[in-house]
Each structure stands twice: as C-alpha cells, then as structure tokens.
Amino acid sequence: MKARTAARSAFEWITAVAIVLAVAWLSSDAARVWFGPIHTLVAEPERTTVHGVPGGATSVSLLVLLDGREIRTGLTHAQLESLLPPRQAVETPVMTSSPGGSRLLQAYSDSGRRFFVSCERNESTGTMQVAGIYLP
C-alpha cells in the first residue's frame, strides 16, 4: 500500500509541475501579445546631412523611375548621364569637397518627382560614381 501511495504522490507531483509549466508558458505568450514585443525591429530610413540636400530628405540606394529606368548607387557618372540627360537637371550642380576628393550634387526632376543625386570620386578608379540618392 505504501508503494501505491508513493506512486500516486509522484504522479500528483509530476502532474502539478506539468500544469505549472503549461500555465507559465501560456502566460508568457499571452503577456507578449498583450504588452507587445520588447524590441521594435523596424529600420529607420537614413536621414541625410549632405550639403545642398534639403533637411529631412531620405537616402535610398535604388530609385526606379516611372519608365523603368533604375538609378542606383555605384553607377558611374557617365552611366548616370545616359540614364538622366542634362535636360532633366533642375538646378545648377553644387560642387563640394568630400573625404575622397570632390562631390557633385545635382537635382533632377522626372515626371514631376524631384530627387537629388550625389556623385563622389572613387579612390581606386578615380571615376565619379553615384554615392547617394536623396528623396525630399
């Protein structure tokens, strides 16, 4: 009879521990849903500090125009000029200095949408390349 009572006691303890663990697991999941996640995993858009670009402009690495042309960082200045002819330039270009040498900033307008393209000299090749695209 003692063995039966011991087995019954062990079963009750195992059941109690299982219930406590289940309640803890369920309550942690419910707490996460009710109070929200601890960390927000949303990437903030990069804000610009380039001279000549309006404050609050957002830097993007790829800009797809309405006709399908793609302006992306890393293009050479010659490739950029073939995609965006000088007639699309809105203002005179702004030439400033950068850590790599010189920086050329040009404002463009395409289908009523204005954007800025910054070109900097690549140290290894010496060619001007698109370093940033900014949307006001």
Image: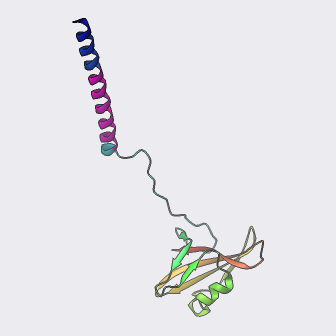
Q: Which of the two residues, 3 or 26, is positioned nearer the viewer here?
A: 3
Residue plotted at (28% across, 32% down): 23
Q: Which residues fall within the magenta stretch?
A: 14-32
Judged left or right of residue 2, residue 70 is right
x then y, percent, for residue 14: 30, 22
Image quadrant holding the N terminus, namely top left
- Does residue 57 appear to the left or right of 132 in the view shown? left
Q: Quadrant of residue 125?
A: bottom right
Image quarter for residue 73?
bottom right
Residue at left 61%, top 66%? Answer: 49
Q: Is residue 47 above or below residue 22?
A: below
Residue 132 image point, x, y percent: 61, 73
Please check the rendered image and state whether residue 37 is part of the magenta-colored stretch, yes or no.
no
Residue name at image x 44 percent, y 47 percent: 39
Which of the pair 120/71 is nearer the observer? 71
In the figure, 123 relative to 11: above or below?
below
Give the residue at the far left of this rendering.
1
- Type of secondary structure dominating the magenta stretch: helix
Q: Residue at x 45, y 53 (%)?
A: 41
- Front in this rendered view, residue 18 or 66: 18
Does the magenta portion include 31? yes
Residue 22 percent across, percent down from the top left: 29, 32
Q: How is the image coloured?
A: rainbow
